[in-house]
Image (tube, rainbow, N blue to C red):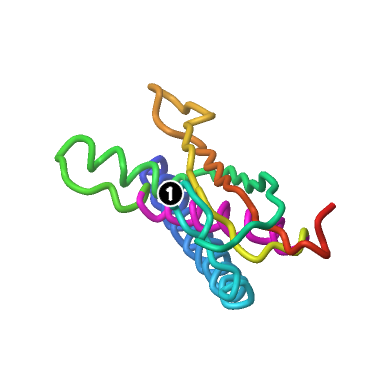
Amino acid sequence: MIELIIFLVLMTLGYLVGQYAEKRHYESIIKREQKLKNLPTIASRFPPPGKRLDQQLVMGSTVISIDYFKRFIATLRNLFGGRVTSYESLLDRARRESLLRMKEQANELGAEYVFNVKYETASISKGRNNTIGSVEVLAYGTALLRPSEAP
């Protein structure tokens, strides 16, 4: 009986702390996205027509770990099938954070655009039974620098 109580307390604590941390991270992401909304990022391999500016590689990397509660829910989903929404939010936060870090680097360089934007995703930490523990998302692209601010 005591084991069940400990398990439930840990699950509840994992859920509450995880939700709080995720909510704060999303708030930070939304605020920073608003600040950088005027720096366009496009997936096209080629710069916008008529733009002959200096170019530089920019990137942003993020590593995010899954919390205990979400790992438990994902394990249940693996048993019964269906969308693993706990991992979806984990990857969404990692992608958005990586894109923001890339845009922040481009903004510091004085970029006008970032084109040829790509993502790389990797599971970098395995938990028990090879379950995902942490994921890394790398966003990279080519920044078009304004001529007066090119390094």
Residue 91 on image: x %, y %: 43, 49
Q: In the image, is 109 to the left or to the right of 29? A: right
Q: Quadrant of residue 113?
A: bottom right
Callout 1: few (<14), some (14-19), or many (20+) C-alpha neighbours within 10 Å? many
Using the image as rendered, state which of residue 98 and residue 134 is in the foreground. Answer: 98
Residue 39 on image: x %, y %: 60, 69
- Residue at 54% of width from left, 73% of height from top? 30
Q: In the image, is 2 to the left or to the right of 25? A: left
Residue 88 on image: x %, y %: 35, 51
The prevailing secondary structure element of the residues shown in magenta is: helix
Label 1 residue SS: helix
- Give the residue pinned by disc 1: 91
Q: In the image, is 82 to the left or to the right of 127? A: left
Q: What segment is highlighted magenta in the picture?
A: 88-108
Residue type indicated by callout 1: Leu
- Residue at 53% of width from left, 29% of height from top? 124
Q: Is residue 98 magenta?
A: yes
Q: Is residue 16 magenta?
A: no
Using the image as rendered, state which of residue 139 and residue 83 is in the foreground. Answer: 139
Q: Quadrant of the N terminus?
A: top left
Residue 144 on image: x %, y %: 65, 57
User: Height in image: 24 above or below 65?
Assistant: below
Q: Quadrant of residue 89?
A: bottom left
Q: Quadrant of residue 74?
A: top left
Residue with the most extreme front position? 50
- Residue at 46% of width from left, 46% of height from top? 45
